[in-house]
Image (tube, rainbow, N blue to C red):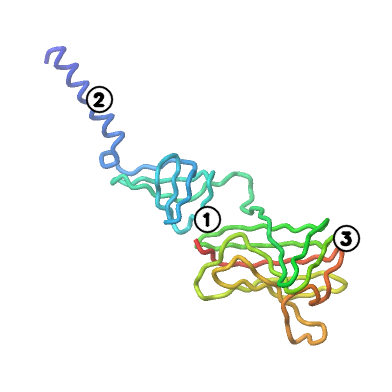
Amino acid sequence: MTAPHRDLAWAIKESAKRTGERTPSVRGSNWRLATVTVVGSDGTITADGIICRRLESYAMPLVGDLIRIDQDSSGNWLALGRTDSGSGTAWQSYTPAWTASTTNPTLGNGTLVGRYCLLPNRTCIATIRLVIGSTTNIGSGTYLFTVPFLSANDLVEYTGKARFSAASVYIGQCFLGFNTTTMNATFPQPATPATAANMSSANPVAPASTNVLRLQVEYQTAT
């Protein structure tokens, strides 16, 4: 084989190699890390310009997530889920809303914080801590508190734990319906302990400075 022929054969071989490296049907499946830039409403995300179908276990994707994406031999991309941040915590902060059926309360110098953790199968654990301050206006009517994500529209409700520390400690439940972001707390009534009523500006007692309410619920998210 002459030198020109050898050069041509080598060029053809290298071109075929480069084409194979870029073609999924030739090289087979592949995976990489990518950053989410768009979260679609149809079960897809866009990461580094690539549209991927996400697994059900990749619950509540967020823009900025560093995720693993896999490509099959047909060129389709699948988002497996977010990578560990290395911070050692899976819990995130959110700001709950505190409202009432008649007059909304105002927090003043009190504190209201929320934390949540997302688990596989669209499961969310949310916890709330409310501390009444000296300038808190407790409003009037039945209280409602928001969870971080919409609950699933699956015709079941969710109950969780409630603890209100005032002059006495009251143990109750929180209640979250389906297809909603608001829940209430239920405590026994002091006059009739066997009967429970939703927490309000008067039940189980009127909240006062330094009183603490704690709520926790586990539920399925809508998406």
Q: Which mark is residue 60?
A: 1
The image shows residue 59, relative to residue 218, as above or below, that is above
Q: Which mark is residue 14?
A: 2
Q: Residues within 10 Å of mark 1 (few under 14, many from 20)?
A: some
Q: Which mark is residue 134?
A: 3
Depth check, mark 1 against mark 2: the one in front is 1
Q: Which residue is pictured at 73% across the width and 72% down the height? A: 102
Expressed as whole percent of the image width and height from the top left, the position of residue 174 reads 68, 72
Q: Which amino acid does label 2 sit on?
A: Glu
The residue sitting at 61% across, 57% down in the picture is 117
Closer to the chain start, of discs 1 and 2, is 2
Q: What residue type is labelled 1?
A: Met
* Snapshot quadrant of residue 28: top left
Quadrant hosting residue 116: bottom right
Check contact, mark 1 vs mark 2: CB within 8 A.
no
Label 2: which secondary element: helix
Query: For the residue labelled by badge 3, is the local secondary structure a helix, a strand or a loop?
Result: loop
Mark 1 element type:
loop
* Relative vertical location of residue 71 with respect to residue 13 in this rendering, above or below: below
The residue mark sitting in front, 3 or 2, is 3
Whole-angstrom CA distance, mark 1 to mark 2, is 44 Å
The residue sitting at 46% across, 41% down in the picture is 34
